[in-house]
Amino acid sequence: MAIFDDEPVRKLTAHEIGQDLSLLSVGELGERIEMLKAEIARLEADMAAKSSTRSAAEALFRRS
């Protein structure tokens, strides 16, 4: 939060692949890494759910 009204409020922006990292602090880099790890976990969970749904569908149609 800004101490004075004229200070810009800094928002955490999404990481862009290939982005220049030279202006980011060690703390900001750590935040980006944690954000990306959480996104990877979310993607892997969705992929696993879709894979199990597909496997169930394939098993159902094989029985028919």
Image (cartoon, rainbow, N blue to C red):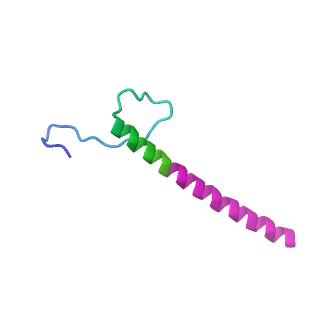
Spot the residue most to the bottom: 64
The C terminus is located in which quarter?
A: bottom right
Left or right: 53, with 5 as reference point: right
Residue at x 14% of width, y 37% of height: 6
Q: In the depicted view, which residue is nearer to us: 28 or 2?
A: 28
The residue at the point 38 percent across, 41 percent down is 13
Query: Residue 42, how many percent across, how many down?
Result: 53, 55
Q: Is residue 1 magenta?
A: no
Q: Is residue 48 magenta?
A: yes
Q: Is residue 61 toward the left or the right of residue 16 in the image?
A: right
Compared across the picture, whether 28 is left or right of 38 comes to: left
Figure check: 51 above or below 35: below
Majority secondary structure in the magenta region: helix
Q: Quadrant of residue 28?
A: top left
Q: Quadrant of residue 50?
A: bottom right
Q: Residue 4 in the image: state x and y as whole percent.
A: 12, 41
Where is residue 44 drawn, in percent x and y? 59, 54
Residue at position x 86%, y 68% in the image: 62
- Furthest toward the left, the residue is 4
Q: Position of residue 11 (x, y in %)?
A: 31, 43
- 15, above or below 45, in the image: above
Residue 52 lies in quadrant: bottom right
- Please determine whether, in this image, residue 59 is positioned above or below residue 26: below
* Start-end of magenta stretch: 39-64
| Figure disc tally | 0
